Image: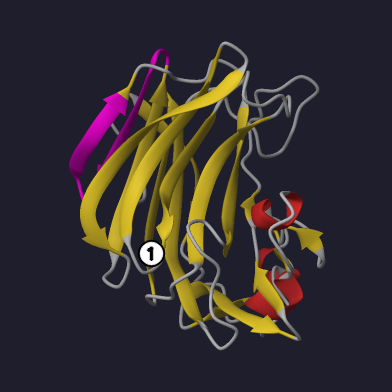
Amino acid sequence: MTGDLPGWKQVFVEDFSAGDVPLGGFPGPLYRARWSAGYKDGTPDTAGQRGGGKTGYYPSKVLSVRNGSLDWYLHSENGITMGAAPTPKIPNASSNPPRANSLLYGRYSVRYRADAIPGFKTAWLLWPDSGVWPRDGEVDFPEGDLAKIIYGAVHYDRNGADAFEKFDSDQSVTSWHVATMEWSPGRVEFFLDGRSLGASTKAPTTPMHLILQTESCLTGCPAPTAQGHVSLDWISIWVPA
């Protein structure tokens, strides 16, 4: 987790050892220099943007730090399904104008687990700084409904429409896993617990920023009573050396 690797220089690491933060208080004074809570309460998530129902991001209802991990409490209140999408503040931004959470190529590694909650999902992703999608691409890992398998995906433009390559694992989220994506010129490769799931040559070529997007309704929405937790033990990020 800590230190440079062959071909990679570490630029960010977080293990949430600075102390606990109560529900709704993240990032708070302990983590504000290195984290943003992401989208504000009430921001529609992916399903909400597509008219998929009452779903959205509510960091004040979802995020905390407890027992040395960043915690998402995924649940519904008053018929609204709630997730959150915190973002690390990565230094040495590569975009122009500079953006605190932007890199052109990098290695991203997380140790995480989750409860098996049908209808909720992770889509921890690299999104283009330009906001132009699908032209400038998208990379997702770890992705998947929390009651199904973990996979990675690379989205790219094909004749003006979204196309993607998907790389499945045979693992569920209920055990601790280390998920790593390596984005380099012309290549994105996905690793789960050190084992390659495969590589795509449809790699983005413009600066991207990391969003730990955790939400609902990928292949079906959660039951109103569905609830549980996603835990991020640590995250580490490198740039090409």
- Name the quadrant of the C terminus: top left
| Residue drawn 63% across the image and 31% down it | 92
Residue 72 at x, y = what percent?
A: 56, 73
Q: Nearer the viewer, residue 82 or 128?
A: 82
- Within the magenta stretch, is there residue 192? yes
Q: Quadrant location of residue 91? A: top right
Which residue is disc 1 drawn over?
Answer: 112
| Residue drawn 66% across the image and 51% down it | 46
| Residue drawn 74% across the image and 33% down it | 99
Q: How many marks?
A: 1
Secondary structure character of the magenta stretch overall: strand
Q: Nearer the viewer, residue 179 or 160?
A: 160
Q: Is residue 157 above or below residue 1?
A: above
Q: Secondary structure at mark 1?
A: strand
| Residue drawn 32% across the image and 66% down it | 173
Can residue 173 be seen here? The reply is: yes
Q: Is residue 78 above or below residue 118?
A: below
**Is 160 situated left or right of 166 in this image?**
right
Can residue 106 be seen here? The reply is: no
Q: Is residue 69 above or below residue 15?
A: below
Give the residues drawn in magenta, as a range.
185-199
Residue 142 at x, y = what percent?
A: 40, 50
**Few, some or many C-alpha atoms within 10 Å of disc 1 (few <14, some 14-19, many ≥20)?**
many
**Is 124 situated left or right of 43 in this image?**
left
Q: Amino acid at mark 1?
A: Tyr
Q: Nearer the viewer, residue 183 or 117?
A: 117
- Within the magenta stretch, is there residue 74? no
